Amino acid sequence: MKRICNFFAAFAFGVLSISAQNVIDFEELTIEPNSHWNGSDMSGSFTSKWMKFYNEFTDWGGGWYSWNGFAYTNETDTETFSYLNEYSSASGSGNNNSANYAVAYVMSDWMNNYQPIPVSAKIDRNQMTEPIFGMYISLNTYASLYMDADNLYQTGKHWYKMMITAYNTTTNSEVSKEFILADYRFENLEPLKLNEWTFIDMQWTGDADSLSFVVYTSDFGDWGPNTPSYFCLDDINGGLFTSIPFEEEIQLSYDINAGESVELKALVKGGVQPYNFEWDIEGNSVNAQTVTVAPLETTYYYVTVNDAIGNLVARTIVVNVNPTSLSQNKIFANLTIENENLRISSEKNIGLVKIYDITGKLILENIIASTNGSINISNLSGGVYIVSIPNLNITQKIFK
């Protein structure tokens, strides 16, 4: 994007004038019309103004190649659903109908449970001395069309997210923020899907000298993520021109049987990302968009969500527990903690024992193949835990 102007930014942003010289719009990078650079020159990177973007290109011979990291492009195909159409943004151009923009591909590490391999960029702090104000992100065409093929994302209620981590290599510090590129879990609102260029706040990166990016999804199979792992960037350090209305959809009541768990979700869209999700789970603060809880009785939970420009919602959620389900066929058992061991005795074989933290996250599991036994819990910090013994139809809180 060539044109940068002064603007009034809502709430926390105040009034700001951004010089075009400090905005990375990729327009100075020369490529033929409707083409791209993907690292085939084996240079390993490209630089735009004060940021260096890293790339890895492998020539397999016979016309076959692979790449990951960053590329830059001016391709405009928004209709072709093919892995060959990997260099087009879902909007068909750069931000504000500009020509050039960056596209990234995130590979998965098949040797490490298909975890995403971060793509990275280096900030030249001799040229850029201020915090990055913001930037624009979007889906690429291939990923966007995949989500809609056969209503795959709508049917599966899937989401697709990006994590940005800012590093300061001098102080050896880092901070990460999550950004939602697509979310189809809404029941009453249209899905969140960034087909258009969308501004995100980057002031939280502070004096970081490098950034890394990964994408991840709920659409995950035996061979890693099924969703094509791409995203697009433009106008890094660009300004906020419009803010999409902030909307939320948070279910306020759940009904479960005793011994069951339930996932609580805070779904939001619009405003300016990143969002901050904070749950009060029986006095414990948890920062996550979703939490899993397993209350033994009807319990109230609290969630607060805010975005980068001051939009905020706070909601109270009740999980109603039917206690009768647990009393049926319940077997007597005695649970005690002695010398960093959870000791269990029962009138029948105990079997599988699962220990969850207060948010419902599985912390430890073991099998006791008799009517008496113990589990070492010395690695658990002090606090409240939930012990589940399915064979005895028992779920019980313990205090360490």
Image (tube, rainbow, N blue to C red):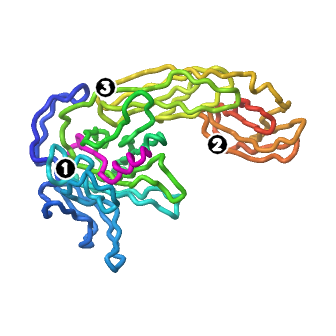
Q: Is residue 328 magenta?
A: no
Q: Count residues near mark 2 (Cα–Cα under 10 Å), then give few for <14, some for 14-19, many for 20+.
A: few
Up/down of 243 relative to 367, above or below: above
Q: Count residues near mark 3 (Cα–Cα under 10 Å), then give few for <14, some for 14-19, many for 20+.
A: some
User: Callout 2, which amino acid?
Assistant: Ile
Inspect this view and state whether residue 114 appears.
yes
The residue closer to the viewer here, 381 or 323, is 323
Q: Secondary structure at mark 2?
A: strand
Q: Which residue is mark 1?
A: 93
Residue ID at (11%, 45%): 20
Q: Which residue is mark 3?
A: 310
* Disc 2/disc 3 C-alpha distance (Å): 35 Å
Residue ID at (28%, 51%): 232
Q: Secondary structure at mark 3?
A: loop
Q: x and y percent of residue 253 in the render?
A: 55, 21
- Mark nearest the camera among 2 and 1 is 1
Nearest to N terminus: mark 2 or mark 3: 3
